[in-house]
Image (tube, helix red, strand yellow):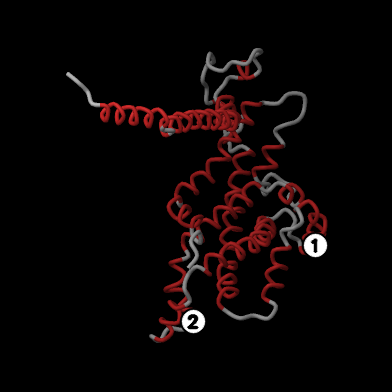
Amino acid sequence: MTISSDRLVKAGAVTDTVADNPLPRRRRRGRGRNIVEVTLLTVVAAAMLFPVLWILETSIKENRDVYAVPAKFFDFKVTFAHYKDVFFASDGGASDVSRSFLNSILVAGGSTVLATLFGVPAAWAYSRFPLRAKKDQLFFILSTRFMPPVVIVIPVFLMYRELGLINTHIGLILVYAAFNVSFTIWMMKGFVDEVPAEYEEAAMLDGYTRLQAFRRFTLPLLVPGIAATAVFALIFSWNEFVFAIFLTTSQDVRTAPPAIAGLIGGTTVDWGLVAACAVVFAIPVLVFAFLVRKHLVAGVTLGAVRR
């Protein structure tokens, strides 16, 4: 069987084209790059999650395993005695730490609700109405968050002492709400800007007042933004330490952060109890974020596409 020279030339051209084609080589490089990226991300995730896993593990260890040298990662006896000590004292009554958790729930929840009630209407007003020196006012509101709490805690303490708000729940709620209102206004203004004002104008043409149009038509569209803002405000109030330790003097009012910090000191530290307190302390915020997760995702992504 004979093969013509034309077929040989075409076959040679096809072979050279396949050999010179860079696509398989690029695919191999892409796979190698993906493997490297996944490996690096796995290492970073392991480094970030290791402290959390170590706290969880410490909270279910017996004291002898907590102080064991070398450290025991797997071969230890599981116990939940530390979690019992978080909620119950040695005499069977409620522990000081459990009361501090209830105080944190009351103070953080109250300040978040108060900041939302004041911040959302203010953000709507700044978004909808032409105000004199609006940018200057917004900058002044934002400037209240420039200084850390430790800088102004002494003036606040002196003011609270004159007003009789030292060592009270309402005092902590007010100071936390004052910090959260500025944050709420700035966050919610961006969300309100994304809701067309034509909705309210159309409702007003149908006989609704300005406030009724806001409550019936604009406010339901702001629920994702309110959820996202409330989560961040709750985290600030839940984790705040400086005001909680300077403005409270008794365990009946003190919140969880200073109460947990008070467990660390003296000659010996019950690290199992501290770890159990840390785990319990993290649960309420995680539960709240889980309950509003749908609105939270929508609120975080709201405004990503401009109208």
Residue closest to the eye, 108 or 217? 217
SS at mark 1?
A: helix
Write down the quadrant of residue 126 in the picture: bottom right
Q: Identify the mark at residue 280; answer none if there is no mark.
A: none
Residue at the disc numbered 2: 210
Answer with left or right where residue 210 lies relative to residue 281.
left
SS at mark 2?
A: helix
The x, y position of residue 209, in whole percent, is 46, 84
Q: Identify the mark at residue 159; answer none if there is no mark.
A: 1
Answer with left or right where residue 136 lies relative to residue 195.
right
Q: Which of disc 2 and disc 1 is earlier in sequence?
A: 1
Answer with left or right where residue 161 lies relative to residue 129.
right
Q: Which amino acid does label 1 sit on?
A: Met
The x, y position of residue 113, in whole percent, is 56, 60
Q: Which amino acid does label 2 sit on?
A: Arg
Residue shown at 80%/62% (left/top)?
159
Residue shown at 27%/27% (left/top)?
5
Residue closest to the eye, 91 or 20? 20
Residue shown at 43%/77% (left/top)?
199
Write down the quadrant of residue 200 in the picture: bottom left
The x, y position of residue 226, in whole percent, is 51, 61
Quarter of the image that includes the N terminus? top left
Question: Nearer the viewer's eye, disc 1 or disc 2?
Answer: 2
Q: How far apart are marks 1 and 2 (CA)?
A: 38 Å
Residue closest to the eye, 59 or 182? 182
Label 2 crowd (10 A; few <14 / some 14-19 / many >=20)? few
Label 1 crowd (10 A; few <14 / some 14-19 / many >=20)? few
The x, y position of residue 208, in whole percent, is 42, 83
Residue 129 sits above or below residue 93 on the image: below
